[in-house]
Image (cartoon, rainbow, N blue to C red):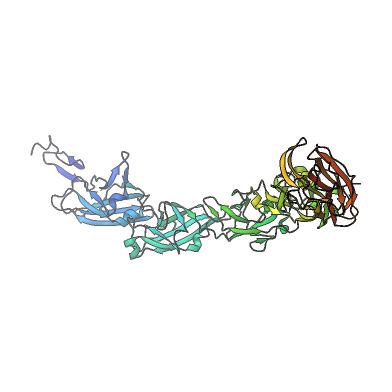
Amino acid sequence: PGDPILENPLPVNAEDFHQRTTSLLQVDPAQDLNPPHLRESVELPPGQWQLNPVNTVNGGHAIVSYAGMFENDHVCAYASGPGFGPVALGCKDVSEGQIKLSFDVAPHIIAALFNKKMVLNYSVQFNHYQPQSSPDRTVQVLAPQLTLPCIEEATVGIVDLNTFSGDATAVVPVWDYAEEGECCWMWLSGTREDGSDYRFDIVPGKPLTPEWLAKGVDESIPRDRLKELADCTGFELHFAASFDGKCNRETAIEFPMQVFAISQENLVLKPPTVTEAVGSELTVWNGRNGVHVEVNYVGNHPNHSIQANWYRPDGSCWLLESQPGSTTGPVIFSVPREAVIESIGTTVKINFTVTSDCKQQTSDDLNLHISVPVRLPTPVVKQATPPATQHGILDLRTFNGDADGTLEPWWFILAGQNVWAWGEGTADADGAPLTFPVGTAGRVTEGEVTAGLNKLLKRSDLEKLRDKTDLLITFNVTPDIGGQVSNAIEFPKLHLKFRKAFYDLTDFDPSGKGWNGWQRGLGAANPADLALRNDLWGGRTGYWLRDYSYTNTSDPVTESEKMFKIFTDLEPGRFYRFSALVCNSSGQGSNPRIALAVDRKNITDVVEPPTTWQTLAQVFQATSNTARLSVNNHKMGAIHGNDFGITMIELHEVQQ
């Protein structure tokens, strides 16, 4: 070595006393120790150390290294933290050549100090000196990365009770640092239907079992508990576990909370009921002021919005204001009388729709059959006698102009309802059925709602009816506004006896009535007499009969009668006008002498008609129902001339 006075190779903690060339060395046993280093920690920011527990799942490593580390140094390491330890990490003797020692930091030590500061230090003892402690190394242990609790039956975060039966299953996958004997807690929190807070403990602080440590925590959530949550709301699934061996909820660490939405079981929505109906049958009279649709179901709640659906004949719905649900009884909807009326005679589909915050559901249908009214007025013809009585008489001889067919307002009358009215009788022309309109089809007006209907029976239509026949008056009304005749309600028919002035015309048209019951008399026994003609004569064109006087007549009493007709439907005491067009159809020789007779007695003068047509007529009073009317030629013999023509024989009743 060099000069000890000039060189000083001693440690800094050695003191040199220079008195002479021989020095006295005095050494302080305390060493300048470094704090231990946790190999898995990171210095961030400078001077501060942090530990991510992900890196120490299998434990950490406390590294001890200091200057002057010599063989046989006895080193003991320790860990501590708030409310924890100190815990010995073990003791080791330094071997020859070693410059550092590593001490295992068990996982449970790190777990016990999650979110806390962990303090590491060590002591060194050599020779016979007392142990010397190192400076502390403080490491901030971060929060662990924990698994997420879940519900196996959830779909995209929704627990829909309609998609599974039985209980739900809450699962927490295995997490790091879990150890048997540590405890866990699981609970859910949410909101009840009444808005109050709800909590249910699924796992109320149980020690972790070997099965849970292998597969994760698996626990049932009773279905009835889930049903206590308000439908369409969110609820939270919580989980916490202890890591410090204390099984204390206060020091347990909560896992990330998971939020789910609950969708309760679909409501069982039975069909609504109608208060005024018996089951599915409604007597329409009971709904004359409208009806009430009652809605009730298990789970009825004020948070629900209920819409009653009353379907109209065209498929649309009546606009009924929606109402909130109720927990005290059925929700009642008032349906206006118009809705009942327009569906008379049909089956109405009725249901209701319940809307909550997250779903909409429609009930089963009530198919309500609405009867046809029986309280219906009968039409009236004002001019009939009596005017409002079945089987009264409508006699055209008792009034002038058209007749009035009226119908008083019916209890279900609405403006816009369609009306059809018609009469049915027998055609005078051919005896066939005859139908004619009563007024014009159309819609009920606002004025008619209070005044009723007045439809004209046109006289021109009535004149076409046969006398002494039945007349039916019918009114049909649709219950719905603008409805079709196929849906119309038929009111009671009015049965009348029809009368009119007697009228009988014979024009000899073969396409019509032809001779119309007239027959040859003895004065026209020769078939060549009374020949049918259709040509121009005497300034007139048309059908007529020409008598050539081929029959050789001689008895004025029996053989003057050229043609006759027996009428059996006259009314005694009434007056009738018997007329005909006659002419001289020869213009040469002897002139015919023509007269009209009733019951073989002339009622007209005997005339010698000109070659032009003239009317021969007279009024007589019937004395019985039967009368024999005839056309007579009082010129006897089959002689030159004595030809006549006849047509347009009329018999009609006249007023006197």
What residue lies at 51% left-to-right and 54% top-to-bottom?
A: 190
Q: In this view, does 393 lie to the left or right of 141?
A: right
What residue lies at 49% left-to-right and 55% top-to-bottom?
A: 263
Which of 637 and 293 lies nearest the eye of the viewer? 637
Which of 474 and 262 lies nearest the eye of the viewer? 474
Which of 322 and 124 lies nearest the eye of the viewer? 322
Note whether 107 is above or below 52 in the view shown: below
Residue 584, how many percent across, how many down? 81, 40
* Residue furthest to the front: 639
Residue 166, how many percent across, how many down? 45, 64
What residue lies at 25% left-to-right and 53% top-to-bottom?
A: 131
Residue 328 visible in the snapshot:
no
Q: In this view, does 45 lie to the left or right of 540?
A: left
Q: Is residue 320 left or right of residue 584?
A: left
* Residue 251 lies in quadrant: bottom left
Residue 623 visible in the snapshot:
yes
- The number of callouts visible is 0
Note whether 141 is above or below 539 in the view shown: below
Residue 483, how many percent across, how many down? 65, 48
Q: Which image quadrant: the N terminus? A: top left
Residue 234, how many percent across, how many down? 49, 52
Note whether 537 is above or below 575 in the view shown: above
Q: Is residue 570 left or right of residue 129?
A: right
